Amino acid sequence: MRHNLSQRDAKHIWHPLTQHKTHAKSHALSRASGVYLYDTEGKAYIDAISSWYTAVYGHCNDRITGPVAAQMQQLDQVVFSGFTHEPAVRLSEKLIARLPGNQEKLFFSENGSTAVEVAIKMALQYHHNLGAPRPVLLAFESGFHGDTFGALSVSGLSVYNGPFEGMALEVRRIPVPRDAAATESLHALERVLEEAPVAGFIYEPLVQGAAAMKTHDPEGLGKILLRVRESGALLIADEVMTGFGKTGTFFASEQLPLSPDLICLSKALTAGLLPMGITSCSAAVFGAFYSDSIEKGFFHGHTYTANPLACSAALAALELLETAEMQQNIARITASHAEFARKVSQHPRVREARHIGVIFAMDLAVEGERYGNLRDTLYSFFMDRGVYLRPLGNTVYILPPYVITNEELQKLYQALEEVLEFIR
Ligand SMILES: *Cc1c(COP(=O)(O)O)cnc(C)c1O
């Protein structure tokens, strides 16, 4: 049956991030529950990356699906230009109360990339509306911000944007801070600020997800943020991956000395149930658009903006995240990762082990292409052991659902240790 579905899939479906000529057929799943994914043959896999950082409360959690099912009977979809509704308003009140204190307004869209597009456009138009246009954006090397044109422009991973380099927005890049002094980054930043009118700086706070969970120095990042703010450019925190507890706090930005002007949210925002993105901003950003002249408004809107079902999923997710139970889960996983990182970092085949919040990553002491053979070998190694994760080159990382038990967590660690004996 699984084989059959995979074959039918291959006939008409073009999968994301896939070279179909060399890639094996897609693996057919039939259901998911809690931390487990089940394939059509009934084999269970622990979802060690929460399905790309979304399903952090476990799959098909009835505390999320229940309220959404009820909402489905009530109000399904509205045109958000002109109409509003209870789930959106309640979500705005609850989320603003949780976001860094300077955040004032939410702009809804449909995914992480659109949340980034919106933030970029807001930053550019902000300066335009103030009468001093600044056409350049600043980003970190090897950052990832999504696949739409604006988002890929600010992304620095060539595997994603190589063919489009130079075709989109004007972006300058600086290296991530290596230490608290961030000397190299600050020098690069000074050079950029001298040469280019920078509208905004977009960054993944504390950890770069798609760059293989590369963490960087919070103090060093703080210094960069301070200098960027001094220059009048806006700070755009892309918390699409880091948001909603991943780094141990509700938002990674809380661990930094400055609150961003704009924040991008998606992924765990809706607990893996429905797609939605949000761009939040400060009163000062909103103020630059608030005017008697219509053209100073923000003319951007997606059809499914603030879809009531997605809003009710986000609301239920936020309520769940606030429970003592979920906060304890996050603390438990964080402590557990720290202990495992200490243990495994001594291993001769571990080049580096790092962890922040519920994220654990280790670089294997072998060379590997990001999407090459090693990746496929590692992927199959874990799948054979009932663990679903996606290695990036020679980095293996996990970001398990918060509801994972200690036993299941140990099973993940065990698989990670076994791979060290397996690789050569
Ligand atoms: C996944 C991701 C995005 C893009 O989100 P999509 O929903 O896949 O468009 C943007 N920024 C970061 C940091 C991400 O991890």
Image: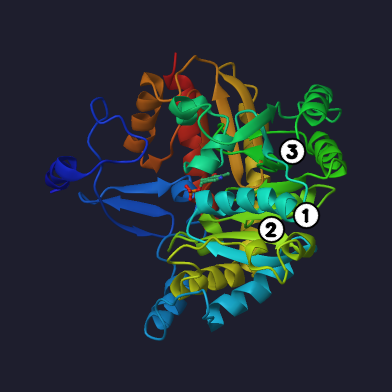
- Residue closer to the observer: 51 or 386: 51
Quote the CA–CA distance across marks 2 and 3: 29 Å
Residue at position x 56%, y 76% in the image: 88
> Quick check: 228 left or right of 90?
right
- State which quarter of the image contains the C terminus: top left
404 shown above or below 303 = above
Does residue 338 appear anywhere in the picture?
Answer: no
Q: Earlier in the sequence, mark 2 or mark 3?
A: 3
> Quick check: 195 left or right of 138?
right
Residue 215 position within the rendered picture, expressed as x and y whole percent measured from the top left:
67, 34
Residue of label 3: 198
Residue of label 2: 250
Residue 138 position within the rendered picture, expressed as x and y whole percent measured from the top left:
69, 35
Q: Secondary structure at mark 1?
A: loop
Quote the CA–CA distance across marks 1 and 3: 14 Å
Residue 242 position within the rendered picture, expressed as x and y whole percent measured from the top left:
62, 48
Q: Label 2 crowding class (10 Å Cα cut-off): few <14, some 14-19, many 20+?
A: many
Q: Label 3 crowding class (10 Å Cα cut-off): few <14, some 14-19, many 20+?
A: many
> Quick check: 234 left or right of 168?
right
Q: Earlier in the sequence, mark 1 or mark 2?
A: 1
Count the numbered circles shown.
3
Q: Label 1 crowding class (10 Å Cα cut-off): few <14, some 14-19, many 20+?
A: few
Q: Secondary structure at mark 3?
A: strand
Residue of label 1: 130
348 shown above or below 375 = above
Say which amino acid is labelled 1.
Leu
- The answer to whether the residue labelled 1 contacts the one labelled 3, judged by CB atoms less than 8 Å apart, is no
